[in-house]
């Protein structure tokens, strides 16, 4: 079939919206008509080359839609089912999945290839070339073919333009606070960067019972939105947050610091560590450039104060459990998905949407098809 998609042909060029040819799903695969896709910063890392995935590539990894056709052997999905894509597939059988770490499923090793899990070939084609897919999904398109391991079935009453955010940003941010940081009641938490992930780290910290939540972002609009999501204090930079923390904690500093900047920078890790208390934990969720190999921090401070630095992928969560769980919190009014969507765009407006992200105008832009 023919459909429309946004393709990145070369780094540091705009997304090209054009017609593509899409093959039928093979065994274990699903054809999905996509309703909406979040515009995550990780796809911006494709354009800058910070994530060196194989090009040309159909972008997008934060999507939701309706199943139109299933391949041979797919028994638990049927046409008409509503699904959210997990940007990391989960097989349910590998050591990581079977021990409750679906975010580290062995199938994730294939993400950089951007091809189908079953046979490492492509179902998407344009201009006579095979196309790869961001996270083996390619949600910047009206239709896609994905492996069933990437699908999470959801109830049909949830608006798909909100549900798509659960494919990455919401679970990643919320889990960074609840799972990776292990925020506890009465904790002081700092969230550095208030985009689609940071906003949900704030919500996660609030729901976990944090006493104080300091949101750090240079953009005033994002600091204002942070207060709506549950922040108690804001600062324009980590340097500005330092004396603020000293004042509100009587010098004990933050129990947890969660790094959710648009692009991570090893040069500022020392500042993040300085915000952490004795036995404090710094969670690194934001993506760093693939070729960055250094971080500026005091290892003496790490040892003498027993501080911790941990990484977190997909919020250290389990998509098949956490996506339905968080949709339940949304239904109950405890998790704000509506406020995350600053503006919606058509697929043809994708480059406008990413420019708005660069300009700090969006918490999360969403493509609605």
Image (cartoon, rainbow, N blue to C red):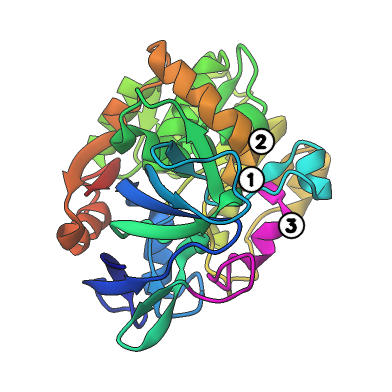
Give 18 or 179, whichever is nearer the viewer: 18
Q: x%, y% of residue 64? A: 38, 43
Name the mark nearer the viewer: 3 or 2.
Answer: 3
Q: Tell me the quarter of the image containing the N terminus.
A: bottom left
Marks 1 and 3, how far apart at CA: 16 Å
* 337 in magenta: no
Q: Is residue 102 above or below residue 69?
A: above
For the question of whether residue 256 can be seen, the reply is no
Label 1–label 3 contact, CB within 8 A:
no
The residue range painted magenta reads 103-122
Secondary element at image label 3? helix
- Pick the front one: 261 or 149: 149
Residue located beneath label 2 in the image: 180
Q: CA distance from mark 3 to mark 2?
A: 20 Å
Q: Which residue ends up furthest to the bottom in the rendered image?
A: 128
Q: Residue at x 45, y 24 (%)?
A: 327
Q: Is residue 103 left or right of residue 41?
A: right
Give the dominant element type of the magenta stretch: helix, strand or loop: loop
The numbered mark, 1 or 2, whose residue comes first in the sequence reads: 2
Is the residue marked by circle 3 packed among few (<14), some (14-19), or many (20+) residues within 10 Å? some
Q: Position of residue 303 (x, y in %)?
A: 82, 44
Q: Are marks 1 and 2 in contact (CB under 8 Å)?
A: yes
Magenta run includes residue 110: yes
Dot label at residue 312: 1
Label annotation for residue 106: 3
Check residue 208 in the rendering and tell me which mark sits there, or answer none. Answer: none
Q: Position of residue 244 (x, y in %)?
A: 45, 28
- Of the image marks 1 and 3, the number of the one nearer the N terminus: 3
Q: Where 368 sits versus 279, above or below?
A: below
């Amino acid at each position: 079939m023919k459909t429309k998609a946004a393709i990145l042909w070369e780094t540091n060029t705009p997304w090209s919206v054009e017609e593509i040819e899409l093959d039928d799903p093979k065994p274990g695969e699903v054809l999905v008509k996509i309703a909406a896709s979040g515009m995550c910063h990780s796809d911006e890392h494709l354009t800058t080359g910070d994530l060196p995935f194989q090009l040309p590539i159909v972008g997008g990894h934060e999507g939701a839609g309706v199943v139109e056709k299933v391949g041979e052997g797919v028994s638990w999905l049927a046409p008409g089912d509503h699904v959210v894509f997990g940007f990391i597939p989960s097989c349910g059988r590998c050591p990581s999945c079977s021990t409750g770490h679906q975010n580290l499923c062995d199938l994730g090793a294939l993400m950089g290839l951007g091809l189908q899990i079953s046979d490492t070939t492509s179902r998407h084609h344009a201009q006579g070339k095979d196309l790869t897919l961001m996270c083996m999904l390619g949600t910047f398109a009206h239709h896609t073919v994905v492996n069933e391991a990437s699908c999470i079935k959801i109830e049909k009453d949830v608006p798909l333009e909100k549900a798509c955010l659960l494919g990455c940003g919401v679970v990643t941010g919320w889990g960074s606070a609840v799972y990776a940081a292990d925020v506890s009641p009465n904790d002081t938490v700092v969230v550095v960067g208030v985009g689609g992930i940071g906003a949900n780290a704030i919500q996660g910290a609030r729901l976990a019972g944090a006493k104080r939540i300091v949101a750090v972002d240079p953009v005033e609009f994002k600091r204002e939105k942070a207060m709506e999501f549950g922040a108690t204090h804001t600062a324009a930079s980590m340097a500005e947050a330092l004396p603020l923390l000293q004042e509100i904690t009587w010098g004990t500093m933050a129990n947890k610091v969660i790094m959710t900047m648009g692009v991570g920078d090893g040069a500022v890790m020392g500042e993040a560590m300085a915000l952490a208390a004795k036995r404090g934990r710094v969670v690194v969720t934001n993506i760093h450039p693939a070729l960055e190999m250094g971080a500026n921090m005091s290892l003496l401070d790490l040892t003498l104060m027993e501080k911790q630095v941990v990484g977190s992928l997909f919020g250290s969560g389990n998509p098949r459990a956490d996506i339905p769980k968080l949709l339940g919190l949304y239904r109950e009014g405890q998790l704000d998905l509506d406020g995350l969507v600053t503006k919606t765009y058509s697929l043809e407006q994708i480059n406008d949407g990413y420019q708005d992200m660069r300009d700090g105008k969006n918490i999360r832009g969403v493509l609605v098809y």
